[in-house]
Amino acid sequence: MTDQHPAFSGGRNVALKVPPHRYEATVRFYRDILQLPAVSGPDGDATGFEFGPCNLWIDNCPGLSQAEVWLELVASDTGSAAEVLENAGIARRDEIEDLGTGFDGFWISSPSDVIHLVDSQKQSWA
């Protein structure tokens, strides 16, 4: 067990996971009705917008029946964070989305089943 508790803070990314039948209408809502500025980011089935000091990602997610909100947590040390969260009984959920090799982070589920990405302060994505 590590001696120091990692520092956690809210990240700047919020993901709205949307089923395909709602994706285009959801993107139009943020782009055309609210006219939020676009954010460039990962290629694929995701569209990003500036959302105050955060980025809001609209992700097209086949297999979902309704939208889900996923949040980002930034940890000063992801290894210590993983240990602290495991000792607290927080479920790891790495199976839900592949983060790729070299990504310093992992997925968890809060006690209320909200998905959180826990990643390093050093991450450079969006």
Image (tube, helix red, strand yellow):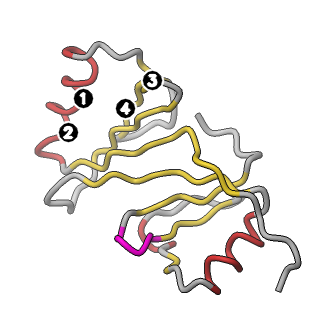
Along the line of sight, which residue is nearer the eye, 53 or 28?
Answer: 53
Report which residue position mark 3 lands on.
Answer: 50
Residue at mark 1? 27
The magenta stretch spans residue 58: no
Q: Earlier in the sequence, mark 2 or mark 4?
A: 2
Reading the image, the residue beneath label 2 is 23
Question: At x 78% / y 62%, what residue is drawn?
Answer: 77
Q: Secondary structure at mark 3?
A: strand
The magenta stretch spans which residues? 109-113
Amino acid type at image mark 4: Thr
Which is closer to the viewer, label 3 or label 2?
3
Q: Position of residue 93 (x, y in %)?
A: 47, 74
Say which amino acid is labelled 3: Glu
Which secondary structure, mark 4?
strand
Residue at (73%, 65%) from the top-left corner?
78
Q: Do the CB atoms of the residues marked 1 and 2 lie less than 8 Å apart?
A: yes
Residue at the limit of the structure toward the right, as seen here:
3
Q: Position of residue 70 (x, y in %)?
A: 40, 53
Q: Are marks 1 and 4 in contact (CB under 8 Å)?
A: yes
Which mark identifies residue 47? 4
Mark 2 belongs to which amino acid? Tyr
Q: Secondary structure at mark 2?
A: helix
Q: Give the Cα separation between the discs numbered 2 and 4.
A: 10 Å
Disc 1 is placed on an element classified as helix
Q: What type of secondary structure mainly makes up the magenta span?
A: loop
Tell me the amino acid under the disc marked 1.
Answer: Val
Is 112 a magenta residue?
yes
- How packed is label 1: few (under 14 Cα within 10 Å), some, or many (20 or more)? many
- The residues bearing labels 3 and 1 have C-alpha atoms spaced at a distance of 13 Å
Q: Quadrant of residue 115?
A: bottom left
Q: Position of residue 121 (x, y in %)?
A: 74, 47
Residue 118 lies in quadrant? bottom right
